Amino acid sequence: MKSETTSGNRGLLQAEPLIFESGHATGTGVDLPAPKGGKGKLGGLERKAALDLPGFSEPETMRHFVRLSQKNYAIDLGLFPLGSCTMKHNPRLNERVARFEGFADLHPLQPASTIQGALELMDELAHWLCTLTGMPAVALSPKAGAHGEMCGMLAIKAALEARGEGDKRKRVLVPSSAHGTNPATAVAAGFIVDEIKGDNDGRVDLADVTAKLGPDVAAIMMTNPNTCGLFERDIKAIADAVHEAGGYFYCDGANYNAIVGKVRPGDLGVDAMHINLHKTFSTPHGGGGPGAGPTVLSAALAPFAPVPHIVKRPPPHAGEVLSEAKGRGTSAPATPPSVARDARDTSPAGGGGYELREHTDGTQAFGRMCAFHGQMGMFTRALTYMMSHGSDGLRQVAEDAVLNANYLLARLKPHFSAPFGDGPCMHEALLDDSSIKPKGVETIDMAKALLDEGYHPFTTYFPLVVHGAMLIEPTETEPKRELDRFADVMISLASRVNAGDVEFFKQAPKLAPMRRLDETRAARQPRLRWRRGQNDTGEKVAAE
Amino acid sequence: MRYLPLTDADRQQMLGVIGAKSIDDLYRDVPKGALLKDLIDLPRVQSEIDVHRHMQRLAEKNTPAGRTAFFLGAGAYRHHVPASVDHLIQRSEFLTAYTPYQPEIAQGTLQALYEFQSQVAMLLDMEVANASMYDGSTACAEAAMMAARVTKRKKIVFSGGVHPHYIDTARTACEALGLEIVALPAAVDDEAAVTKALGADVAAVIVQSPNVFGTISDLTGIGEAARGAGALMVATFTECVSFGLIEPAGAYGADIVCGEGQSIGNALNFGGPYVGLFATKEKYIRQMPGRVAGETVDADGQRGFVLTLSTREQHIRREKATSNICTNSGLCQLAWTIHMTLLGEQGLKRLAQLNHEKAVALAEALAKVKGVEVLTKRFFNEIAIRVPGNAREINATLATQGVIGGVAMSRLAPKAGMDDVLIACATEMNADADIAVYADALKKVIA
Amino acid sequence: MSTRYTKDHEWVKLDGDVATIGISQYAADQLGDVVYAETPAAGATFEKGADMAVVESAKAASDVYAPIAGTVVEANGALATQPDLINQSPEGDGWFVKIKVANKADIDGLMDEAAYADYVKGL
């Protein structure tokens, strides 16, 4: 919006330059004791390169970031119907618990005796994840979903190598509807990708899978429910066929919110599945992370889980001290990795205890995914959430998520094109642009019009298997009145399309903090950082 | 249930509109037998009171670092994070926002990202930086893979000073791609040894400064040698506060500088979430992994920011992407930016100075303990000491005395042949009295 | 020699031993505003159908495949600073590479202008 005011502000929305434009390198908002001075041990390697970093007092810093925050849409503001992202409410109890001194002020390399509660918590989380999914083991260290995918694919690779088939089996089947991380991960893990077709019903084509199986197939990677928001009816048949052909089944767990507590992936023949704690288990999206991607593993893959493993030691004999040196993995009997537990161990932790096995010697672990032990800050939040809901609450989560998505589908499909709308969807509903494109309106235009209506739009142009996809996932934390309001808005926009008001859509947004941004210019002339002497003043830049 | 707004009346009404008899009607595609009839055998719903109590008990079974005389670093550092940082990152509009794919309603996230990228580039003295990686170890792995792409070569050489977890992490990712990892023997002060391993098949030499033993090094010669052999020099780090006082690798001509940002804005959190910093030269931006924000204008000519160069990423390039990374470290990156804004150049310099002084005092106090030798000659805030005995056992005994003396190198690398080496760190959070406590306790344990 | 086209929307113009290669108007239109093009270095050889170049718009990245086998003689240096040439003149100044053709007969299998126009109509 053009500036109608002298300040550039617009009521509550404040114009805010870059810190480099308003700050100076001598300001600071942190009081620290004065250094004593004295002989250093830097060996002459003092910094000579300019720093030029601006600093602000605390009140200025607060203002800067509060002003920026007001230009962001957020779940706490309204419905965030981004398909495949599961933008559910982020409970604040999670935030309180994560910040307990006993969790936040803990160094990952502290001696085992000082971190028993942390290891017990990870073990408890592992128990919840394994029990919910019906899988015997879980690798907790992956830092996000894509990292979890890598974990699962590397476990599969290790299993194949252990069978002597590592060189023979290089092909991974990936549906055309898969999220981009799937083929990217398969290639990063050293496989080649073979695309499988979808059928006319939005699901993976079983016949195409069977046709493409062979003795060189390592695995199939599937998402269930799939990226069109549909449950893969043939999933068991596909799993069986893949197993019979000697391959493994990787399941992308991004859509687990639809089936948590209702269906166990272990019952469907899954060998590995990553779980996005920042989707299904409510840890906050934070503007792009951090996430966590713990990966559940079948009995076939469990031995290959990456280190570290959490090992529970039985109580020692009387008088024996459990020292760190004795607990090392090299001298321990080979127990199944961590968090491989079948039944809740009810023996008291007193006397015995938890330890970390951090090296692969004596195990079949494929290696280490990252430094230290994983995203503890997300484990505390996710376990808090799971315990808050309980198994009954979590089942209700899935049911309400599916109910909300179907309700929106029912309200919208008379006014839009729902390519698979004849049957129920799962937690997300898919529309395509065939009802709007002929009238000159693209999916992106619909999305930008929604911005003015006060909504973050649905996911656009994904999955790639339909034209101009609009993928809508309300989640279970939306009340009915919010769904109705959103449906009313979508329906009124559909009417506007039918009335031929194309210019309205092409000019949107008009009310958001910014109008449409020139992404071509950003990519053609990449300016990825501030530099002194280059557009310092933040003044209006002439459009090309 | 407090997080579920639908009422039973709502549910009934909605089923009616949908035309389904029951919720399980919507699950009709689930194979027979796979749709669970009973609840899974886990505890039922609990109030905040009960969950809080349970989690509190677990937390109380841990000894927070601040309750001990604490001298542990080796990849994660205990620093003061100003109160306003944590307050700001908990604002709804930051905490519950998503990746800024719709830039018109995400300028808060995007501008903060652009500021972050700028601050990182300035701190590391590099041309461009990305919007963060998961952590320092995976950033290091990504740097190795990027070097392989840029040079079209397959061998990566690690110095004997790189953090063993970083080498192990890179090995896992790189060997899957068919790259060869060569890790030189652990060495307190020999980053330059990598130059001897240069050859026509080497894509990059990866060095660390300050390294895992705390040693800081002038990397100029290594950079020149690498360039002469057609390889890249990747410089990694675990303690970014160091660059408030010492030359960053960018000044030594590094092609990629990457490492851990946790020290700024982020608590120890038992190992995660952290924030990986990644910076490189402008000529390599199209090979750089991860997201990046860029400047542009909107339809009215107003300056704004967008995610850009996305065509390198997985959601577009799919199997030909530069990396499979999607979600990165958003909120941790924001915390880093806010803390760095509060510090500014003056604050960062002073913070770094304090850290160095504490470490110098620590080194002096420990050198006075009979039988102890300080191995690190040039350092920022971390040192390696040789103790007369098994370092792991000595460290465990120190813990029973309320002193967390550091970490034994043999815990990080059991085969390094350094069973008597302990890595200790001091930051601005260490009281001088703590240093005396440590020295006394160590003296007693050794005796 | 008239221009020939592939099903992947590359065009080839042969002049003696050297063929100029680029992407068609249709491809450029589909891509939208081109932001970047990556071309191979002189001396690089390609089999027919191999990955030869990449062209990026803000929202998509497309591979350009070698329509015929050969060795790169020259890449269009102007594309580095003016990627929009590909939008303005995809079949003229927006060319990608000139290659020394390995086997001239390869060209015969490709569609001529009329056949390509029909093919595009059917998409």
Image (cartoon, coloured by chain):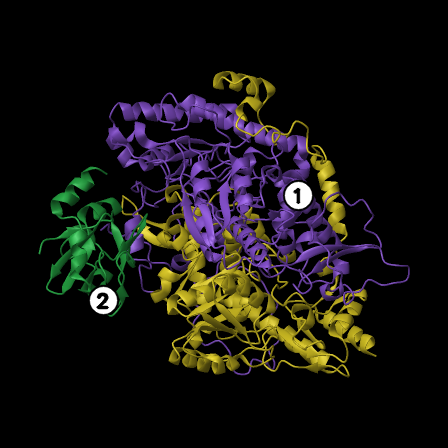
Chain colours: A purple, B yellow, C green
Residue found at x 59% / y 22%: B7
Q: Are marks 1 and 2 in contact (CB under 8 Å)?
A: no
Q: Residue furthest right?
A: A318
**Quadrant of res A271:** top right
Q: Nearer the viewer, residue B175 or B50?
A: B175
Q: Nearer the viewer, residue A409 or A160?
A: A160
Looking at the rendered image, the disc whose residue lies closer to the viewer, 1 or 2, is 2
Q: Which mark is residue C71?
A: 2
Residue found at x 65% / y 73%: B358
- Label 2 marks a residue whose chain is C
Few, some or many residues within 10 Å of mark 1 (<14, 14–19, 20+): many
- Residue A62: where, in percent of width, then height? 51, 50
Residue A82 in sight: no
Q: Residue furthest left?
A: C1
- Residue B81: where, in percent of width, then height? 59, 58
Determine which residue is flagged by label 1.
A130
Three-letter residue code for mark 2: Thr
